Amino acid sequence: MAPTETNKPAPPRHIAIIMDGNGRWAKQRGLPRTAGHAAGAESFRRIANYCRTLGVEYLTVYAFSTENWKRSADEVAGIMRLLRRYLEEALQDMEKNKVCFRFFGDLSKLSPELQKLCRDAESRSTDYDVQVNFCLNYGGRDEIVQAARRFAQDVAAGNRQPEELTEEILSDYLYSAGVPDPELIIRPSGEKRTSNFLLWQSAYSEYVFMNVLWPDFSPSDLDEAIAEYHRRNRRFGGT
Ligand code: IPE
Ligand code: IPE
Ligand code: MG
């Protein structure tokens, strides 16, 4: 691995994060859950910036799952409001922050304003260092179902043969088409589960579970997760 200036090994090309623990962070402080989500958005800004300085090429973040609609209407509305605000600001700062955006998930269930912001962010081409894949109304199972559905439609239309289907071709029907699988998936907050995140893409990802809550997650926590990743022995089924 090419050493960086500080003599640390190069970071993974693609890091994915389950941004969890906002509610508990707020509870600890006697604040409403939405205050935790606002603090989580700040944490995301900080970490996205840090990833850019480290030279990470892809950062995929789980912001809202297909299951998160089960929460109270108030909490969902608060999260949607914060997402709108974040994207409005991000659109202004894309050039400065050298970031580009892609959205993974079924955006059709989001408000028209939010859908437009996502489309605007995705279509704005800018000179960028890091690609942020924002998972919004995202579910790993849902992603595979929509890929299977679109493949079946292509077969029905006569553009594909069923026996043509390979892992590579199915990958091209996923939201993550063209993006390499994440080498490292980090879940803060102490939970040790995937909660329906990147089910297909994580086949050989290294998971690092950490006890810090997402709003408290700092650049040094990211350093620690990357250091742990470098201590792992990745075998991919070999010896
Ligand atoms: C993650 O934090 C944010 C979303 C799922 C939208 P949580 O809101 O799940 O925080 P905890 O797990 O309740 O602490
Ligand atoms: C996963 O966290 C989804 C996001 C962080 C967006 P959850 O808080 O929804 O997951 P569970 O309910 O603890 O499994
Ligand atoms: Mg949670």
Image: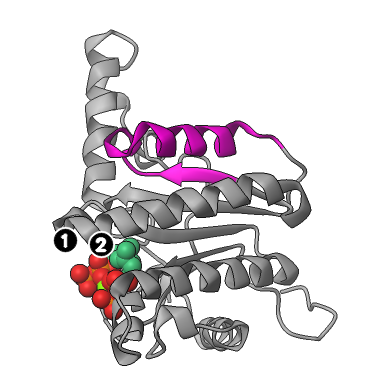
Please indicate, yes or no, whether residue 140 appears anywhere in the rendered image: yes
| Residue labelled with disc 2 | 75
Residue 106 in magenta stretch: yes
Q: Is residue 55 above or below residue 125?
A: below
- Dot 1 beta carbon under 8 Å from ligand 1: no
- State if disc 2 and disc 1 touch (CB < 8 Å): yes
Q: Residue at x 60, y 31 (%)?
A: 123
**Camera-nearest residue between 49 and 204:** 49
Q: Is 236 left, or right, of 72 in this rendering?
A: right
Q: Quadrant of ligand 2?
A: bottom left
Residue 146 in magenta stretch: no
Classify mark 1: residues with Cα within 10 Å, few (<14), some (14-19) or many (20+). Answer: few
Q: Residue at x 37, y 49 (%)?
A: 136
Is the C terminus in the top left, top right, bottom left or bottom right quadrant?
Answer: bottom left
**Camera-nearest residue between 186 and 110:** 110
- Dot 2 beta carbon under 8 Å from ligand 1: yes
| Residue labelled with disc 1 | 72
Q: Amino acid at mark 1?
A: Ser
Q: Residue at x 31, y 91 (%)?
A: 28
Chain part drawn in magenta: 101-125
Q: Is 47 left, or right, of 33 in this rendering?
A: right
Q: Is disc 1 placed on a helix, strand or loop?
A: loop
